[in-house]
Amino acid sequence: MLKRYNIILYSTNKIVNSCRYVSQSMLKSTVNEKTGIATVIINKPPVNCISLELLNKINTEINKLQKDNIRGMILTSVRSLQKVFCGGLDIKEFYNPNPDRLAKYLTNLQDTWLSLYMTSFPTVSVINGHSLGGGCLIAMCCDYRVMVGPDYTIGLNETKLGVVPPKWFQDTMAAIIGHRKAEVSVIAGKTYTTDEALQIGLVDESSPDIDNAYKKGIQFLNSFEKISPWAFKMTKNISRQPISQWLIDNKQKDLEFVFNYMQTPSVQKHLGLYLQSLKK
Ligand SMILES: CC/C=C\C/C=C\CCC/C=C/CC(=O)SCCNC(=O)CCNC(=O)[C@H](O)C(C)(C)COP(=O)(O)OP(=O)(O)OC[C@H]1O[C@@H](n2cnc3c(N)ncnc32)[C@H](O)[C@@H]1OP(=O)(O)O
């Protein structure tokens, strides 16, 4: 029995044998050959908002890392943006959309969420700036969140734009902070400062600076050194499967709901006003 356990540990804990550096301009990914830890950096100025192209790159990279047998991953934003982790989904993808592109975007977002939420390796988001809407969603997909503070904000603010966060957005938050707090939060489109997010458990740790936040992230990943990767993967799978299975079973229905309401005149009007307010 012990022997079998060791074999599982060895075969799944194999550290990648070369340092890979992928720079697809919008997304930089490095794997440290000694530690087997990947750092994935979103790099799409000015605010790292998620276009269809960035979405594709994130999903492709997660799937590659999945095959690389890495030991863990840190997801963060390029430092030069200074105050933004991720400004959310690119609202321009929803405003006066091309229907084919909109359908592709929504499908890719469903797939990317499934990949990131269900990784078989531990993940940490180092939230080094504002993290709103889809930005909050990708941070919440990770197993652990360290947020730099005190002046940044995080939250699912979709209702403020006049749109509806799908069930799996809401469930992802509820799994972290509990149903009641998540409900109050999403219906009001609430955003939280770093301290508030720490207080309600939306983030696990805070840090006054990025280097320290990154260190905390690495410490979390190192805490799995003695955990069998197989046991980690199976346990996480059991924990997250009910939420992910809902989307797998309801992908088409979910897509049609968002695809249809997004193109209604009243939603389009709201989105237009919100975009305008950002430009001011
Ligand atoms: C089938 C189902 C599948 C999928 C479900 C899909 C959809 C579900 C429903 C829709 C869900 C949407 C989720 C979202 O993510 S909505 C977006 C939420 N994000 C925000 O509200 C953030 C808005 N931005 C800001 O608050 C600030 O920009 C920010 C604090 C991030 C940074 O402030 P800063 O002062 O540094 O920059 P700005 O001057 O404000 O912005 C610079 C330029 O960037 C433009 N911008 C900002 N955010 C966005 C964005 N999210 N999308 C597009 N463009 C954005 C901003 O307009 C400025 O543009 P210019 O003026 O320079 O042209």
Image (spheres, grey):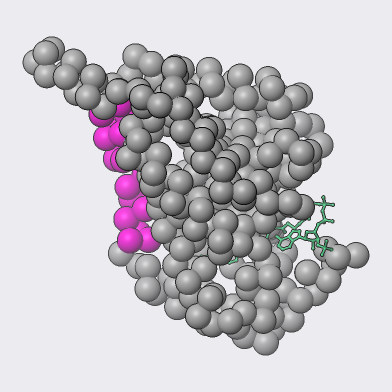
Which residue is rendered at x = 43% and y = 45% of the image?
A: 62
Viewer-closest of 267 and 196: 267
Would residue 134 appear left or right of 243 to someone viewing this image? right
Viewer-closest of 108 and 189: 108
Residue that extends furthest to the right in the rendered view of this protein = 280
Q: Main secondary structure of the magenta part?
A: helix
User: Quarter containing ligand 1?
Assistant: bottom right
The verdict on residue 96 being magenta is no
Looking at the rendering, the stretch of residues picked out in magenta corresponds to 229-248
Q: Quadrant of residue 84?
A: top right
Which residue is rendered at x = 56% and y = 43% of the image?
A: 23
* Above/below status of 114 relative to 11: below
* Above/below status of 170 relative to 204: below
Would residue 50 appear left or right of 64 to someone viewing this image? right
Viewer-closest of 140 and 8: 8
Q: Tell how many labels.
A: 0
Q: Residue 137 appears at what percent x and percent y?
A: 56, 50
Q: Quadrant of residue 235?
A: top left
* Above/below status of 170 relative to 209: below
Regarding residue 71, the answer to whether it shows in the image is no
